[in-house]
Image (spheres, grey):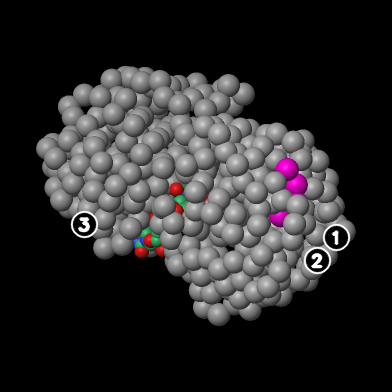
Amino acid sequence: MDRYKLLITGGNPLRGETSVYGGKNTSVAVLPAILLCDEPCTVENLPDIEDVHVMRDMFMLLGAQVKYDAKRRSMTVDPRPVTAFHVSYQYTQRMRASYYLWGALLGRCGQCEVGYPGGCAIGNRPFEQHVKGLRALGAQVDDYGGMIYAKGTLVGADVFFDRITVGGTINVMLAAARAHGNTTIHNAAREPHIVDLANFLNSMGGRVRGAGTDTIRIRGVDYMHGSRYSVIPDQIETGTLMIAAAATHGDVTIRGCIPTHMEALTAKLLEMGVQVTDTDDAIRVRSERPHRAVNLKTQEYPGFPTDLQQPMSAMLTCAQGDSIVMETIFENRFKHLNEMQRMGAKVRIVEQTAIIEGVPDLYGAPVTATDLRAGAALVIAGLMAKGTTEIYEPGFIERGYEHIEEKLRSLGAEISRVDLD
Ligand code: EPU
């Protein structure tokens, strides 16, 4: 139970300028790759969020020398002292991406004993494709007692994913980077952070080609040299801020982002009647008129991202007309809409589809965040609503959004943290 709640008094249009920094999902993929390196590495532009702090703790547990400066957004890790390969559930349950230690520790130590991953309860979240990929490279993988045990001398191979998986693609890229010979990943995920990981591996002397397409080719290398690397900005934080600006009928410029990563969202916002303009590294979102309802279906990149479905469907509760939202990636990502019914949203959920009947207004109410993006969606709902919304369990939001209250306050939102004690 979090010992504080968020209080939001809605109705203020967000206005002004803000910036985004490194992405959560790219940082948690790039950082474990340092374990593959033979020299110290520095990763920059890291977000100051809980998942990055957990990654730092896991490095220290494994024996790496770590210098982390949250203010400067940089972490320098010397992986040379790492010989340990056991990470208990106490650590791994704190984040989903702890499963990237499987590929990274196999590459470094030839073995790993790592507790089950944690992460948001947004569905079943199996990992048999990760295991299939690592086995294809020759690892012996066992799964019992809440631990994953893997070991073996890795040899490059063809890996065919039965379905597109971001985590599985990253794990196999990590394992293959130091395997003997060539690996080809077929049906690979194409998310921007897959490209970012490939660029980082290549900056250390890795040989990764084709990231960003559905076929990634990796030639294992014998040595990786140190690197200084800056991770790409957070696509999902950018999108969440874009939606918050539109949902409050505001005018916000978001700097430091990559507009081409946002095209699926931008297209939907334009369809709703929102104005979106961009330059090389900034996006301006303005909205004056009522929003038109739209239909959307989540898909792998470059489709509409599941991580933005929750904030987007929160905004659609006040669009004019009926919107149909299909969630195809995770089966349990509509919990925020259930909470929002208490705020006056009219929603019917049938299996993986939400039918949203737009209402003129939402009203403040007490609601509970059930996962990271549900929390972000409820913040947006609170910003849109008349009156005051109380959000319980807001700690989820800190896992992925850096200083969200300060950021929103600087844009004119009335948002504060209240102790429950
Ligand atoms: N899947 C399987 N078997 C597997 C792996 C995945 O069936 O072995 C299924 C999943 O159950 C899901 C689909 O494949 O239905 C896609 O899962 P994927 O592996 O792509 O997702 P992930 O790696 O677990 C990452 C992000 C998520 C984001 C998804 C989709 C991290 C740490 N997590 O999860 O981020 O929603 O990709 O883009 O990178 C978030 O940031 O809030 C978040 C949940």
The residue beneath circle 1 is: 386
Does any portion of residue 302 appear in the rendered image?
A: yes
Residue placed at 68% from the left, 73% from the top? 321
Q: What residue type is labelled 2?
A: Asp
Q: Which amino acid does label 1 sit on?
A: Lys
Would you say 238 lies left or right of 183 here? right
Q: How packed is label 3: few (under 14 Cα within 10 Å), some, or many (20 or more)? A: some
**Magenta segment boundaries in residue numbering:** 247-251
Residue placed at 57% from the left, 72% from the top? 324
Residue 21 in percent (x, y) is at: 56, 33
Are circles 1 and 2 on residues that touch, CB within 8 Å?
A: yes
Does any portion of residue 248 appear in the rendered image?
A: no
Look at the numbered disc 2 and give the secondary structure of its residue. loop
The residue beneath circle 3 is: 160
The residue beneath circle 2 is: 361
Front residue (pair 107, 209): 209
Disc 1 to disc 2, C-alpha distance: 7 Å
Are circles 3 and 1 on residues that touch, CB within 8 Å?
A: no
Residue 361 in percent (x, y) is at: 80, 66
